[in-house]
Amino acid sequence: MQQYESYPGLPALIGRSRVSTFNALKGRIWKRIHGWQEKFLTHAGKEILIKAVIQALPTYTMSVFCLPKTITKDINTMMSRFWWGHKDSSHKMAWMAWKGMGRSKKMGGLGFRELDSFNVALLAKQGWRIINFPDSLVARVYQAKYFVGGSFLGSTLGRNPSFIWRSIWNAKSLIQDGMMWRIGDGKNVRIWNDKWVPATPSHTILSPINGLNADATVNEIINQGVNW
């Protein structure tokens, strides 16, 4: 296969120039937009096309690879020009930055996806699957190569990592920010250092350490007779 060919729908090889690798994705989006420019579309129609077609096109690719910022910026620019009005070389003024258009409608935006954040969320979902399904083929392959005898959360980037692994691993921090322990017997959950309290925004104990050591676990404060 040639360097910039795809299989099936994804780049078969990732070269040094990642922008060149994903240019085909940008070209597909441009063809869709270019085909709509000659049609008279209301803003409601444009909103539906952007959300249902343009923002859906890169979703499969973004669930596997972390797209370069240049690519996502160019896609955002194409969507912005399509929204505000663009024919050939004539551009209309954008009355609001595209980032503002991504706010919810309650906050004055239109709810368009912020592609970089959406990309990280999709990759974090892949990492979450590795955690929840350790016996799956992909989880076993990555464990054998990158975190032998360990876990995804404790893994390192490793030497000479693949671009897919690098993409998923970079989303690990998002998983860690959103995770919280579910208390069972409490033997593996540290009172002061782990996230386990649903009632606080940080999900951690904010009071100073008194009476127990810094590494005390939750089972030490559970009344075994009534389980609380």
Image (cartoon, rainbow, N blue to C red):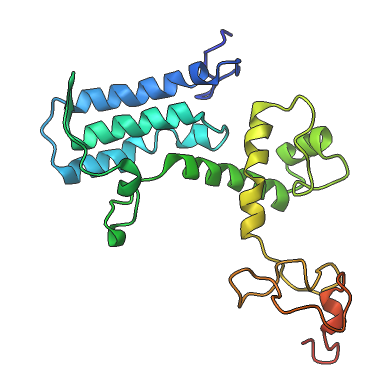
Q: In x, y percent, where is residue 101?
A: 30, 47
Furthest-left residue in view? Answer: 40
- Occupied quadrant, residue 93: top left
* Quarter in which the N terminus is drawn: top right
Q: How many marks?
A: 0
Q: Is residue 221 left or right of residue 72?
A: right
Q: In x, y percent, where is residue 209?
A: 80, 78
Q: Is residue 85 left or right of residue 181?
A: left
Residue at screen point 67% across, 65% down: 180
Q: Is residue 25 visible?
A: yes
Residue at screen point 57% across, 10% down: 3
Residue at screen point 55% across, 43% down: 120
- Occupied quadrant, residue 210: bottom right
Residue at screen point 72% across, 79% down: 207
Considering depth in this image, is 94 or 4 the residue closer to the camera? 94
* Quarter in which the C terminus is drawn: bottom right
Q: In x, y percent, where is residue 37?
A: 18, 27
Q: In x, y percent, where is residue 220?
A: 87, 80
Furthest-top residue in view? Answer: 2
Q: Is residue 89 left or right of residue 113?
A: left
Considering depth in this image, is 52 or 155 the residue closer to the camera? 155
Q: Is residue 185 visible?
A: no
Considering depth in this image, is 1 or 150 the residue closer to the camera? 150
Furthest-bottom residue in view? Answer: 225
